Image: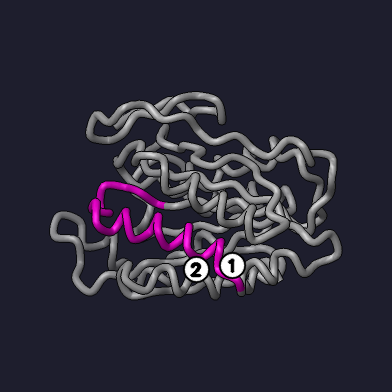
Amino acid sequence: MSSKRLTRRHAIAGAAGLAAATIWPSHRAAASGPVDLQLVLAADISRSIDPEEFALQRQGYATAIADPRVVKVMTGGRFRAVAATYYEWSGIRSQQTIVDWTRIDSAAAAEDFGAKLLAVPRPFGAQTALGEAIAFSLGEFRRCPFPAERRTLDVSGDGTNTSGMMPDIARDQVLAAGVTINALVILSADPMPWNPYHTHPPGGLDEYFRANVIGGQGAFLMAVQGFETFGFAMVNKLSRETA
């Protein structure tokens, strides 16, 4: 399903004809204050992810970012804060900012971010344009109102690229901008019937992401088997990359 790239004040439509919902705005009151990290969270919601898996992933992000262990790390740096934004992606023109740039400097701010994330319907579910999703982050970083020396793109995904720009080309563009790219890979037990390579490429999906997606100073990859442990893995991942 095709979709124009929407900015933070546009409305989104649910995948099943749900009523439009407004993207949550960033906290502009502290826009001039620096943070320790600019963090872009990019979640795969391509059509290989069913509604139950989508719900587990959304809840995993919301729970993880408000976890006391994560909040402690996010508020433990020089400026006692990080800036975060969250977008979802699938096809070539399907990238949607769900929660815009927010200064997370307290447990309350982290909980608010998670609550806003859960309030927005699923915007689409098309092919897996992984490269386009990575490239989309450059615009997100350019829009960030909170200065920071460190910038990290956190990508989750459950399959290989199936359309659009190749991920390694997009990765190199993002790395050239001084951004570190980390990944959380969601493994599946059985290959996808209509496209086995998508979920089970030669060498494994984690190796595909390692070769084509991650990069930059201190870059790392984590892999989980299915969506049931997604939230637990995300707690560990956010704690590590925001430290």
Specify the farthest residue to the left: 193
Which residue is more in the foreground, 195 or 137?
137
Q: Amino acid at mark 2?
A: Met
Q: Which residue is mark 1?
A: 238
> As drawn, is 26 to the left or to the right of 234?
right
Q: Which mark is residue 229?
A: none
Percent position of residue 104, x then y: 68, 54
How packed is label 1: few (under 14 Cα within 10 Å), some, or many (20 or more)?
A: many
Q: How is the image coloured?
A: one colour
Q: Which residue is mark 2?
A: 234
Q: Is residue 87 magenta?
A: no
Percent position of residue 239, x then y: 62, 72
Q: CA distance from mark 1 to mark 2?
A: 6 Å
Which residue is more in the foreground, 216 or 95?
95
Q: At x 34% / y 41%, what residue is drawn?
A: 122
Which quarter of the picture shows residue 17?
A: top left
Q: Is residue 55 magenta?
A: yes
Q: At x 33% / y 70%, what residue is drawn?
A: 187
Residues tagged 1 and 2 counted as in contact (Cβ below 8 A)? yes
Q: Which residues are magenta?
A: 44-68
How packed is label 2: few (under 14 Cα within 10 Å), some, or many (20 or more)?
A: many
Quarter of the image with the N terminus in it: top left
